Image (cartoon, grey):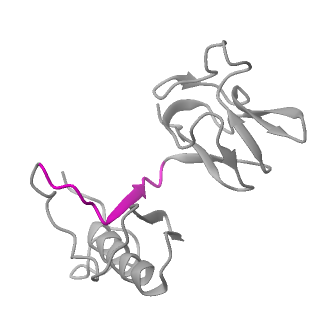
Amino acid sequence: MARARRPGASVGGPSADERTVELTRRLATLLGELGLSELEVESGDVRVRVQRATAPVVAPPPPVAPPPPAGADEHPLVADVIAPTLVTVEAPMVGTFYRASSPTADPYVQEGDAVKEGQVLCIIEAMKLMNEIESKVGGRVARILVENGQTVEYGQPLFLVDPQS
């Protein structure tokens, strides 16, 4: 499939995918050098999050390569590249994330569900108050990024919504 060239991009320069891979490599190296467990960077219309697995990395991370053979137990780094078309619904406050109105109720939404702008996606409990978090756009829930009952921070991504669906 042919890709349209972005204005200002050189014909012989690296592609967007190559730049994303290079950014991921540089972040993985920086993660190891600084001893961080997670690092997220947004550059233009690309967001990259690099996270260290539970086992510490002793050597610098290897270059991006095909997946390891079956049976490999360690994955030193996990990288998520978020498509620029997805809309991130973030936590507007610190609190506890709940996917449903009560422990016995069905979740407000599942991955793949169609949602309307203003539809309740979850609840965040803060200071014994239940705050309904609504979708910023209509579309389809592409990914739920937080586990039920998990504490969330202000600005933490909760959902990815694909407005094109």
| Residue 154, quarter of picture | bottom right
Side of 64 relative to 105 (left or right): left
Magenta stretch holds residue 39: no
Q: Residue placed at 57% from the left, 38% from the top?
A: 147
Q: Residue placed at 73% from the left, 18% from the top?
A: 102
Q: Residue placed at 16% from the left, 55% from the top?
A: 72
> Residue 49: where, in percent of width, then height?
46, 63
Q: Is residue 113 above or below residue 134?
A: above
Count of labels in the image: 0
Could you say which is closer to the camera, residue 44 or residue 131? 131
Q: Return the residue found at the far bottom.
A: 33
Q: Residue placed at 90% from the left, 42% from the top?
A: 127
Q: Which residues are magenta?
A: 71-85
Q: Is residue 67 above or below residue 6?
A: above
Magenta stretch holds residue 80: yes
Side of 56 relative to 42 (left or right): left
Q: Return the residue found at the far left.
A: 69
> Residue 109: where, in percent of width, then height?
58, 23
> Residue 99: where, in percent of width, then height?
64, 28
| Residue 9, quarter of picture | bottom left
**For the stretch drawn in magenta, what is the main secondary structure?**
loop
> Residue 145: where, in percent of width, then height?
53, 43
